[in-house]
Amino acid sequence: MDLQYFLCWRVAPLFFLMPCGLQSMSVHILSEQPVHVIPGSRLVLKARIELGPLEEVSMVTWEREPETGIAPVRVRLATCAGRSLKCAGTRPTVDVNTEQQETTLQINRYSREDGGVYAVTVTDHTGATTTAHCIVREYEAVHHVSVSINVSHSSLVCGEAWGTDPSFSWLYERAAITTTVGKISNDGTTLVVTMTPICGHFTCMVSNKLGYNTATYTAAPCEGRGTTAAVVCLVLLLLVAGVLAFLLWRKHRHNNRGERLHEHLDDTI
Ligand SMILES: *[C@@H]1O[C@H](CO)[C@@H](O)[C@H](O)[C@H]1NC(C)=O
């Protein structure tokens, strides 16, 4: 009597309090989205399956459809079913492995056509389903790097077209940017130039896993200490040459007069 009372009034409400624990099958893809894949490399998508205590997975399917398009066609990539959740891929590059808590889809030698929205659907023993989605795109190289000047703000802005995860850096006359030249914004795309006047070559370098590309902004040539020093040197050289020429000329004249004096003496003797 006591036990029955306990079950009815103490345990039963717990089931109402934890409906999630019973009917809570869910599936999550364990990747940061969108997933970018370098063509020719391997795409791996892992999904975690959460099950209630009385639930059991009876089937897992992986599908893909294009990210855009008027009537996207959904393609089945693999199905896992049966007591041991044995998997079968629909094409040679697809490998799938499923256990009760986890399912992994692997596409070897990823190509552009493998991009799209991937869907993993889990069916439990009662036929209920739950689905998770994941966007997969090709990892793109850096394209069309350009540098433009914002005259009103004395800044240079670096742009890039559609590369994946571009990272920006700057060089001045092929060396790192110092505080006397300018300050780079946190995202790296803008260089606020502090040197005045702005002169010389500013290069923006954009890179990602596939390589890098650069663009250079060429300002007016720098008329700095270098040029002044050259002018001073030239003036000094001309002065020295002038003095030398004068000395030579004087010596020559002196010699001539000496010879004439000699001749005169010879004549009188
Ligand atoms: C120059 O930079 C400022 C501040 O970032 C911005 O508001 C302005 O629109 C820019 N001017 C041009 C011509 O891009």
Image (tube, helix red, strand yellow):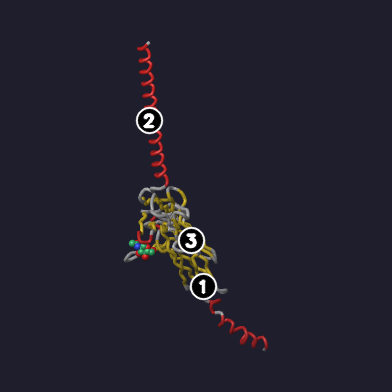
Q: Say which mark, if any, is on residue 246.
A: 2
- Kind of residue at badge 3: Leu
**Helix, strand or loop status at disc 3:** strand
When the figure is inspected, residue 151 is found, relative to residue 244, above or below; the finding is below
Q: CA distance from mark 2 to mark 1?
A: 105 Å
Q: Say which mark, if any, is on residue 112.
A: none
* Mark 3 Cβ and ligand 1 under 8 Å apart: no
Residue at 53% across / 70% down in the picture?
50
**Helix, strand or loop status at disc 1:** loop
Q: In the image shown, does 84 or 78 lie closer to the viewer?
A: 78
Of pointers 2 and 1, the one earlier in the residue sequence: 1
Residues at circles 1 and 3 in contact by the CB criterion of under 8 Å: no
Q: Nearer the viewer, mark 2 or mark 1?
A: 2
> What residue is pinned by disc 3?
45
When the figure is inspected, residue 178 is found, relative to residue 242, above or below; the finding is below
Q: Nearer the viewer, mark 1 or mark 3?
A: 3
> What residue is pinned by disc 1?
25
